[in-house]
Amino acid sequence: MSAHSAEVKRMTTHTIQEMKNRGEKISCLTAYDYSMAGIVDAAGVELILVGDSASNVMAGHETTLPITIDQMIYHATSVVRAVKRALVVVDLPFGSYQGNSREALSSAIRIMKESGAHAVKLEGGLEIKDSVIRILSAGVPVMGHLGLTPQSIYKFGTYTVRAKEEDEAQKLVDDAKMLEEIGCFSVVLEKIPSKLTKIVSESINIPTIGIGAGPHADGQILVLHDLLGINKAFKPRFLRRYADLDTIMTDAISNYITDVKSNSFPSEKESY
Ligand code: KIV
């Protein structure tokens, strides 16, 4: 049965939770547009994140900070149109929730209303507790994000592994417990030691989704373009490339150029 047949059941925050309960790993990927999201969904991932990594991957910015809420809604709307099964989560972009909880709620409502997505993700722990509570109280499912939080890159100064020291590791465990307690349905753990991921995943009942966080998370997420080998310059240790699309695409385009220049494309059969 294909993932798009009529009998396919939609993934929800509850089915994601049930996966953790029965020890089944959760596969997640990013997507930012209709064509890619359709492929990712049909392939069968359980959760698609419309990440603010669109700022890097789609727009070529150095950080995730410049992307706007309107741009996130544009990406999310395109993804939602393609997805038939996966749970679609959208990042609240930098500047759309840090001011106060009222602003956070109106950003979350805009994203949910205008894109048709199923949940939002916010970066941070205790600092954003009030905002998360307010969003949850409006009935919007929230995914947390701890460890390396790219929206705070100028505070950290580097993209190196977080929470290696005891005090930061303890804060991360406390933040994860707090996010569970107030009602988040899941937490992303980015670039933290594998041992800490194990501690967090065993300390909370909601699913942890790791990126650069080792094998003990309840699920894994990667940026789609990194997994497909489209961005060759990005080579962190945690990344496994499952394809070399850069080479495949470059070869295909070079062949097309050759065919156009030699007048072998289009042929008679490709003409009307
Ligand atoms: O924006 C993003 O792609 C993310 C993932 C790396 C978790 O937040």
Image (cartoon, grey):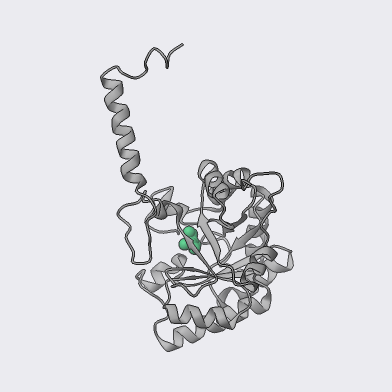
Q: Is residue 185 above or below residue 41?
A: below
Q: Residue furthest right?
A: 138
Left-right relation of 18 to 174: right
| Quarter of image, res 87 | bottom right
- In the image, taking residue 97 as reference, residue 5 lies left or right, namely right
Residue 51 appears in the figure: no
Q: Which residue extends farthest front?
A: 1
Q: Is residue 139 visible?
A: yes
Q: Tell me what residue is drawn at x 40 percent, y 51 percent.
A: 228
As displayed, is residue 110 above or below residue 256?
below
| Place of residue 229 in the rendered image (x, y in percent of width and height, measured from the top left) | 36, 51
- Tell whether 184 sits left or right of 213: right
In the rendered image, residue 155, in percent from the top left (x then y), is placed at 41, 72
Q: Residue at x 45, y 53 (%)?
A: 224
- Residue 7 vs 123, above or below: the answer is above
Horizontal and vertical percent position of residue 89 = 60, 58
Instruction: From the viewer's side, name the closer residue of 24 and 254.
Output: 24
